[in-house]
Image (tube, helix red, strand yellow):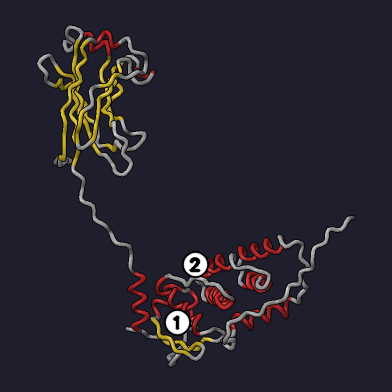
Amino acid sequence: MATTTTSTVTTIAAQAYHVLKINGYSNTLKAGRHHPLSSCPFSAGGHTWHVSYYPHGCRDSNKDCISIFLVLEDIVTEEDVMAKATFSLLDRYGNPVPSYTYHTKLRNFSTSSGRARGFENFIRRDELERSEYLNDDYFAVAAHVIIPKKKPSVVVPPSNMHMHFGDLLVSKEGTDVKFLVGGEMFAAHRLVLAARSPVFKAELFGPTKKGTIDAIQIDNMEARVFKALLEFIYTDIWSEIGHGKDNVAMAQQLLAAADRYGLQRLKFVYEDKLCNHIDTCSVSTMLVLAEKHHCCKLKEACSTFLSFMSPPIVEDLNSSIFGSELEKTVSSSENHGSQINCTDIRIQPWQNTDV
């Protein structure tokens, strides 16, 4: 079987060769534990570096070894500083000793925890002291620093799929189903509707699918609500709630429509937005809307709003009458003003009465 090999080619942008000369090795041993001695700074790739030498190792676990590190002196936060280094113990002729030559991987030196890279167990002190590489209390370590060229970056534009589907809806190209809503006709694509809404999928492709008719009539919904519903189905974009009762009423109707067609994302969006539009005029209708469409967060927000009224006395309403009024105002296409009737909440002035 043939042996496969892999290799990595690094295109070099900059490099530096720096020699750390330790003249007076025995004196360096007087340095305190974990105390590094640093070389003169040098430049490579537009940054300043130095080599750190730990005569007693950098940790208690390697106190019998010499540690060698390449250190980035610059504080860089805007970009990654990628580099790799080769450390070599030099013989008396200045040549690298293969058995004491070590290579780091390509690393990012700009991180706060990674500004120093090297080898904790570069060489044991007793090995160095017995070797021929320590002469007259002198030895040297070479650091070869390589800064690779930055890879060209490709800016990937954000997805614009929603724009293409939106254009498809506006152009009506390839539409195969029509809806009659509030006296207005809307054309759409069965597959798009079915992909986005389980209710439309059942109506258009299920056992109860509509036959070949000119248009499917949708009752109890305003044309503008259905238009916003289609826009969300095609683009996943929803309308923001502006100020005014009409805008809040539109949001309430969109929440009801989203629940009707199984568009949970849209339902959650408007439930969250309506939580920020609760006042004394709308809290009662919001409560019934939350109850009818199982909006737990909206119901909780209404309860919280009522609990902070100081202290409120709210008119006891008949739930069936209240519910029917809400259904008529939220769902009926005959409510051209889109105004949800407000149930009066009478607040009595609070009096501090001694008990």
Asked whether residue 119 is in view, the answer is yes
Asked whether residue 291 is in view, the answer is no
Q: Is residue 130 above or below residue 156?
A: above
Q: Which residue is mark 1?
A: 204
The label number, if any, that marks residue 265 in the structure image:
2
Q: Is disc 2 placed on a helix, strand or loop?
A: helix
Q: Position of residue 190 (x, y in %)?
A: 40, 80
Q: Quadrant of residue 280?
A: bottom right
Q: Nearer the viewer, residue 284 or 77?
A: 77
What crowding class fits label 2: few (fewer than 14 Cα within 10 Å), some (14-19), or many (20 or more)?
A: few
Q: Is disc 1 placed on a helix, strand or loop?
A: helix
Q: CA distance from mark 1 to mark 2?
A: 21 Å
Q: Nearer the viewer, residue 41 or 330?
A: 41
Q: Position of residue 69 (x, y in %)?
A: 27, 25
Q: Residue at x 61, y 65 (%)?
A: 298
Q: Residue at x 23, y 26 (%)?
A: 41
Q: Residue at x 21, y 45 (%)?
A: 150
Q: Position of residue 120 (x, y in %)?
A: 31, 23
Q: Position of residue 54 (x, y in %)?
A: 30, 18
Query: Most extreme residue toward the right, as rendered?
Result: 355
Q: Quadrant of the N terminus?
A: top left
Q: Residue at x 42, y 91 (%)?
A: 212
Q: Nearer the viewer, mark 1 or mark 2?
A: 2
Q: Is residue 14 above or below residue 175?
A: above
The label number, if any, that marks residue 165 in the structure image:
none
What crowding class fits label 1: few (fewer than 14 Cα within 10 Å), some (14-19), or many (20 or more)?
A: some
Label 1 vs 2, first from the N-terminus = 1
Residue type, mark 1 in image = Leu
Residue type, mark 2 in image = Arg
Q: Quadrant of residue 55?
A: top left
**Left or right placement of residue 272 versus residue 319 in this view:** left
